[in-house]
Image (tube, grey):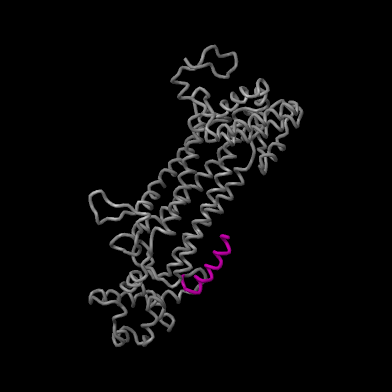
Amino acid sequence: MTEKQTWSQRFETALHPAIARFNASISFDIELIEYDITGSQAHAQMLAHTGIISSEEGEKLVTGLEQIRQEYREGKFQPGIDAEDVHFAVEKRLTEIIGDVGKKLHTARSRNDQVGTDTRLYLRDKIQQIRQYLREFQKVLLDIAENNVETLIPGYTHLQRAQPLSLAHHLLAYLQMAQRDWERLGDVYKRVNISPLGCGALAGTTFPIDRHYTAKLLHFDDIYANSLDGVSDRDFAIEFLCAASMIMVHLSRLSEEVILWASEEFRFVTLKDSCATGSSIMPQKKNPDVPELVRGKTGRVFGHLQAMLVIMKGLPLAYNKDLQEDKEGIFDAVNTVKACLEAMTILMQEGLEFRPQRLAEAVAEDFSNATDVADYLAARGVPFREAYNIVGKVVKTSIAAGKLLKDLTLQEWQQIHPAFAEDIYEAISPRQVVAARNSYGGTGFEQVKQALIAARTQIV
């Protein structure tokens, strides 16, 4: 049997060793130790502030907790399985350092509100870190875009050539996705930054605590108005995992495009050695491991979201041991999102190179200018739907003849419709096709330049 735990005298024997291992969370919730110490210091200060303990006792608790922080940072404090969780580990070590005063730390507090506070402090910190990673990712996209306003790239719908685009416009689409991610995390932060400390096990406490005082010390914006809700709420964790999943969706979409662009079939980008690997048996290959891993890790984050939803969907009020299962998913999602953002930022900044000549060839070898032929006719009085049908027949005929629209003679154009004139060739040139789309938010070069200015202002 293991050492008897810090339970009441109702318990006569210790946990079975296997159950102790099964029950323990110290192997992963040690991640929260500094947040636990910070929260405990605020709690100790509040106990002294309200006269529940003396000011001298409060100072001893705060100083002892700070010593534990330093011991942990120096690798001198490494609690094992017998501690069960990070909260008991810290309290036990505190009592070793300062004696029986350490046993007063848990006055007017439960592990239920304690772990809720720790998790929020942790997630609040990590959200700010991830937002900074998003900003760095956006800045790299913006830098590339500013250098490629007039670089053309085929645009696709249904993975079929649709209309040519400014490469900058294409990259700015991902910048806007990242901006929504940044804003979404900011919104989640508001609900993370509410303090449950003082809610106790589920019903509050008989001690004259000051919950607003601890909230202020810990820089929380507000406190939970209902103690039951405070200890059992994990909406903020679900929201964070939703936001993390959306970040991964966006990174995965870009990853898929990079993988396609780097293929021999597309050849839109060249992968640099610093961000690619080779094959163990095929010496000619250069593999896009970074985007493939990001694409793969996306499912991992989705899984944590699904797990959290399933954990919560059947829990009666208030705290249940099931909630111990929230942490590993949150920790892993945080680490995965940060790693993927960092990897994709490096990949885009220095791991690939666009091939403008190949891109120019690509937009010149298809029928993605067909809509512009229909627009040409519509601008000359032909009803658009009629013009659309005319151009559809022209494309069909051209394909059968092995020609592109640019290869038709003026006589052939005028046989199709007398409204066609010499300027049709300029109207359907890829560069003009892009430039002409000057509606707000469009891919026209002037619109893209304005979008770049706005983006640079937005992400400072």
Which x, y percent locates residue 216? 70, 40
Indicate left or right for 231 with 159 as reference: right
Total numbered badges shown on the rendered structure: 0
450 within the magenta span: yes
Residue at (69%, 30%) from the top-left corner?
44
Looking at the rendering, which quadrant does residue 455 occupy? bottom right
> Which residue extends farthest top?
12
Looking at the rendering, which quadrant does residue 206 occupy? top right
Indicate left or right for 85 with 300 as reference: right
Secondary structure mostly seen in the magenta stretch: helix
On the question of residue 309 being in view, the answer is no
- Return the residue nearer the eye: 247 or 305: 247
On the question of residue 260 being in view, the answer is yes
Residue at (54%, 41%) from the top-left corner?
237
Indicate left or right for 308 with 275 as reference: right
151 within the magenta span: no
- Return the residue nearer the eye: 33 or 162: 33
In the image, the segment drawn in magenta is: 443-460
> Which residue extends farthest right?
51
